[in-house]
Image (cartoon, rainbow, N blue to C red):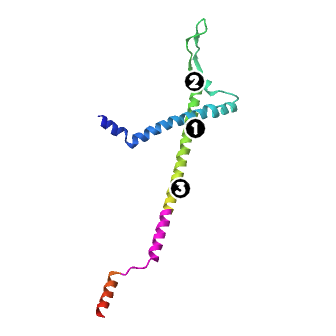
């Protein structure tokens, strides 16, 4: 069973997926910071200082004890957090789109360059073959031998 597990875990797809998950988690932190620390404050500035994460519809107020501690927490629909999550998603989707587009463009350029090099090598090989002295054919060699034997 351990050998099967080891074989499974060392397959290329599993390792690639694990790397993707780890890198995706790190990328997610970067995008979350970008949204929370840069984009949302700008949007808040444009909307007269509104903090989207504070937007909510209170269904029932919090009940407090005499000492001021919360006895029953408030019930609220936090649509501001939902807006924040949508903005996060859109930025992540845009970022992934741009990265994939960039990778595809780089891949296309590499394939184009490789194809050009192959065509250049093929043209050089054809030119070298045309410039090389032509080897006599079997019929020409036999005719030459026949002529030498006649002499």
Residue at the bottom extreme of this rendering: 151
Mark 3–mark 1 distance (CA, rounded to whole Å): 27 Å
3 or 1: tag closer to the N-terminus: 1
Q: What element carries label 2?
A: loop
Check if residue 62 falls in the magenta segment.
no
Residue at the right extreme of this rendering: 48
Q: Which residue is drawn at 55% across and 38% down?
A: 92
3 or 2: tag closer to the N-terminus: 2
Q: In this figure, which residue is indicated by the disc labeled 3? A: 109
Mark 3–mark 2 distance (CA, rounded to whole Å): 47 Å
Q: Percent from the top left, x then y, of residue 22?
A: 48, 36
Name the disc covering residue 30, or none. Answer: none
Secondary structure that dominates the magenta span: helix
Q: Is mark 3 on a helix, strand or loop?
A: helix
Is residue 67 or residue 115 the one in the foreground?
115
Q: Percent from the top left, x then y, of residue 48?
A: 70, 29
Q: Relative to 138, does residue 52 appear above or below in the rendering?
A: above
- Magenta segment range? 117-136
Q: In this figure, which residue is indicated by the disc labeled 1? A: 91
Q: In this figure, which residue is indicated by the disc labeled 2? A: 78
Q: Which residue is drawn at 31% across and 37% down?
A: 4
The reply to whether dot 1 and dot 2 touch (C-beta < 8 Å) is no
Q: Is residue 126 left or right of residue 85?
A: left
> How dense is the environment of label 3, judged by Cα within 10 Å: few (below 14), some, or many (20 and up)?
few
Q: Nearer the viewer, mark 1 or mark 2?
A: 1
Is residue 106 or residue 58 the one in the foreground?
106
């Amino acid at each position: 069973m351990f050998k099967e597990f080891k074989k499974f875990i060392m397959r290329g797809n599993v390792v690639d997926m694990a790397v993707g998950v780890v890198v995706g988690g790190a990328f997610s932190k970067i995008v979350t910071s970008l949204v929370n620390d840069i984009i949302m404050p700008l949007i808040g500035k444009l909307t007269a200082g509104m903090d989207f994460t504070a937007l909510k519809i209170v269904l029932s107020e919090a009940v407090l004890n005499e000492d001021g501690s919360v006895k029953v927490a408030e019930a609220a629909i936090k649509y501001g957090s939902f807006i924040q999550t949508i903005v996060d998603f859109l930025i992540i989707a845009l970022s992934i789109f741009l990265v994939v587009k960039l990778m595809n463009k780089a891949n296309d350029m590499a394939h184009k360059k490789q194809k050009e090099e192959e065509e250049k090598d093929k043209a050089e090989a054809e030119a070298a073959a045309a410039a090389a002295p032509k080897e006599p054919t079997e019929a020409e060699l036999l005719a030459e031998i026949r002529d030498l034997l006649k002499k």
